[in-house]
Amino acid sequence: MTLLVLSWVALGCAAVPALLYLSNSFLFRAPPLVESARGFAISALIPARNEEVGIAACVHGVLASTNVELEVIVLDDASTDRTADIVRAIAAEDPRVRLEPAPPLPPGWCGKQHACYALSKLARYDTFTFLDADVRLAPDALARMASFQQTSRTELVSGFPRQETGTLLEKLLIPLIHWLLLCWLPLWAMRRFRWSAFGAGCGQWFLTTRPTYEKVGGHSAIKASMHDGLMLPRAYRRAGFRTDICDATNLATCRMYQSARGVWNGLAKNAREGMAATGQIGFWTVVLLCGQVLPFVLLGLQLRTLLGWVPALVELWIDGGAVRVNLAVIAVVVVLATRYAVADWFRQSLVAWLLHPVAILLLLAVQWYALVRAVVGRPVGWKGRKAPHAEANASGAA
């Protein structure tokens, strides 16, 4: 009977995100096309710290934008590689590009948030788009995002680019960004209510306007945050403004990390402000294990009995085993069908689909790793810098 109860629990935990995905699949759309006669004035603001591998492609992608009056400002955030030299060479050929040095990082600030805030002070136009240096935009991307911001009547919009992956860990973990978004965030509620809990975005690409940004406080409102994808939209919502997100699969691409170690640490640095928050990690651990891993475990146990000797098979049917098998099969089908739909939509590797339970276990391992690091006073930093909270603790101890 215990297995029967677990089978129902597994099916319920698998069905809820699947149903939410079905609802969200009608709401999560690309920004509208823009008429060729329409133009926007946009400041593209790119923080860059040791980005020599991709900064040229990022800047050239922005410069190819259509239907926009444009300036591109790259903030060199104390890079020790050729980032500044590469941008300087592009700026010598195109007057729309400016290279600026980052001011010294004040105590208590995350490097990226400080760089974005400094960039906002340098912008000439009143529409800002904050862009990570590893993002590549299509020519119509900026105009369509600006149009989306206006037509959606929201103050901050964010696009989710197509995520490129290389290593096995990238293929397993990075695609879960879209899966988590569409299976766990009710988009209808996000657009109807301004509750900060519904704030969501992708830190790789934001677009907003100067007046609203300054009313919110911009990135200074989240200066210690390592996760602007969540925290910036929530800051806007706490200030009474609306935010929205869109599908940028055909408008932008991004390879977030270049190695398995980069994936692990990159996700871990954000985790404490998301799933690994003290009040949330228990919930996520239970619902993800029950809905995304347990169905496969139960099905394996039932199949093992079915493949055994005849008395065991008879006992299985007498004890309601047929029901348990059916429930486990349905739960597995629901999980894999939903995961395949996400992989197909966002052009993700099918490795993530085939090894979905493994990916979930790895995701939870990252969350607990981040939590343990924070508890022992060693939160995960990034790009040679300690997390702001770790710096504060260190200075307090001194």
Image: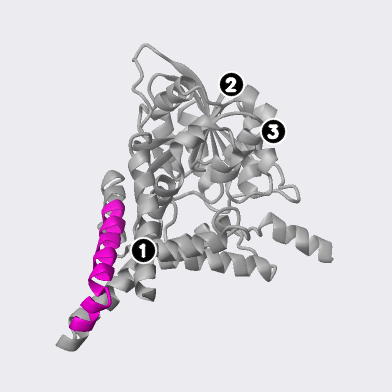
Q: Nearer the viewer, mark 3 or mark 1?
A: 1
Q: Residue 217: x, y in percent?
A: 69, 33
Residue 345 in the magenta stretch? The answer is: no
Q: Nearer the viewer, mark 2 or mark 1?
A: 1
Q: Depth check: 172 or 242 in front?
A: 242
Indicate the quadrant where residue 220 lies. top right
Read off the residue under disc 1. 8
Q: Are marks 2 and 1 in contact (CB under 8 Å)?
A: no
Indicate the quadrant where residue 333 lies. bottom left
Kindly tell me whether residue 168 is visible in this rendering.
Answer: no
Q: Residue at x 68, y 28 (%)?
A: 214
Q: Secondary structure at mark 3?
A: loop
Identify which amino acid the numbered label 1 is placed on. Answer: Trp
Marks 2 and 3, the one that precedes in the sequence: 2
Marker disc for residue 248: none
Marks 2 and 1, the one that precedes in the sequence: 1
Q: Residue at x 53, y 26 (%)?
A: 154
Q: Residue 368: x, y in percent?
A: 55, 67
Read off the residue under disc 2. 126
Identify which amino acid the numbered label 3 is placed on. Answer: Gly
Kindly tell me whether residue 123 is visible in this rendering.
Answer: yes
Give the alpha-carbon distance from disc 2 to disc 1, as whole Å.
Answer: 53 Å
Q: Which residues are magenta?
A: 313-339
Which image quarter is the C terminus in? bottom right
Q: Secondary structure at mark 2?
A: loop
Marks 3 and 1, the one that precedes in the sequence: 1
Give the alpha-carbon distance from disc 3 to disc 1, as whole Å.
Answer: 47 Å
Main SS of the magenta segment? helix
Near mark 1 (Cα within 10 A), the count class, few <14, some 14-19 or many ≥20, is some
Left or right of 316? Residue 36 is right
